[in-house]
Amino acid sequence: MKTDSLFYRLFQTLPNLVFELIGVSISSADKYHFKSVEIKQTSFRFDGLFVPPEAEIKLPIFFIEVQFQKEADFYSRFFGEIFLYLRQYQPSNPWRAIVIYPNRKIDMADTRHYLELLESQRVSIVYLDELEGNKTESLSLNLVQLVITSEANAINLAQNLVTRTKQEISQERQQRELLDLIETIIVYKLPSLSREEIKKMLGFTEIDLKQTRFYQDVFAEGRQEGRQEGRQEGRQEGRQEESVALVLRQLNRRLGSVEPSLSTKIRSLTIAQLEDLAEALLDFENITDLEAWLQEN
């Protein structure tokens, strides 16, 4: 499951979620905005950065990393990114860091050189499985629990969240965004289910899953229609061209301009390979990741 992209969406839609996770109350929390920031002339890219309004120089900047895989030198990389950012951008604001793990077993990185930072108030570590013990009624935190819950419990929890969202969120746009998030998480967790099965399980009647960002980004709509109707050669060629264009746009947004030699290789991929690349690129951090993927595939 592509947890980085899920949490990017969660934090963009629910800025207060960050502060709920670490149990901190921040004035002007609703004015923070979440973005991904790349450090120039390096391959470093933050999972996320929460930035307060420019005039609020006393409010901290929050560096956020969602870490769902073991990485022996994680803290070396993460703090290296932070200090490179501070040197390059020289913000006036103080800073804090948040690391989000699914559980303590993943937190296995070497901490020898960073104990003082990890024990300070600058750094907060969140273990998502321990949130399940909280008797909180927070809709935001329950959405996070949906990301890590077992497949067996996912549908029941998602159904409950759909009901709560419709009851508690009156603003139409925010309600639609939250429902879209729930759909997306279930699609990631239960990829074998069809769109209609998900729609029925979640009790949607007026929401068309065809419009979810997930399906648009990773060609699920193309997969389903391609299996059923896309047997004609002309249609296949059209789909292939559209798929190439979408993948190149996604890569340009995530990694910057793609070299012509790599673009040529991408244009030679089959539709199935392009679909796989569209999913894989959500985890790419630099051009090297793309080159390695193309070499393997």
Image (cartoon, helix red, strand yellow):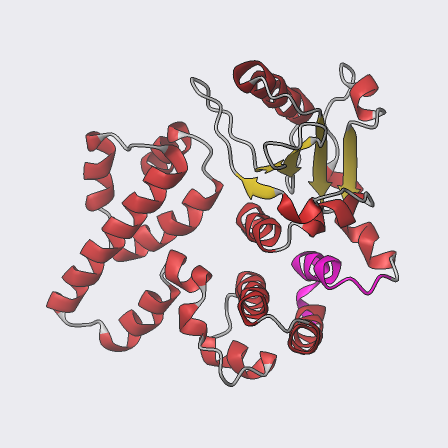
Residue 119: x %, y % from top left: 85, 25
Outermost residue toward the left in this view: 234
Q: What stretch of residues is rendered in magenta?
A: 136-152
**139 within the magenta span:** yes
Question: Taken as a whole, is the magenta stretch helix, strand or loop?
Answer: helix
Q: Position of residue 72 (x, y in %)?
A: 67, 26
Q: Which of 168/58 is in front?
A: 58
Q: 279 above or below 205?
A: above
* Residue that protrudes farthest toward the front in the picture: 55
Is 249 magenta? The answer is: no
Q: Left or right: 8 with respect to 138?
A: left
Relative to 213, is 242 on the left or the right? Answer: left
Q: Is residue 235 left or right of residue 252?
A: left
Residue 281 shows in this picture? yes
Res 103 seen here:
no
Q: Is residue 77 left or right of residue 136?
A: left
Which image quarter holds the C terminus?
A: top left
* Residue positioned 42% across, 32% down in the render: 289
Identify which residue is drawn at 67% across, 25% down: 93
Q: In the rendering, at what x and y percent does residue 285 appear?
A: 47, 33
Work out whether residue 48 or residue 223 is closer to the camera in this orientation and state it: 48
157 and 162: which is toward the camera: 162
Q: Which residue is depicted at the point 71% across and 41% down? A: 100
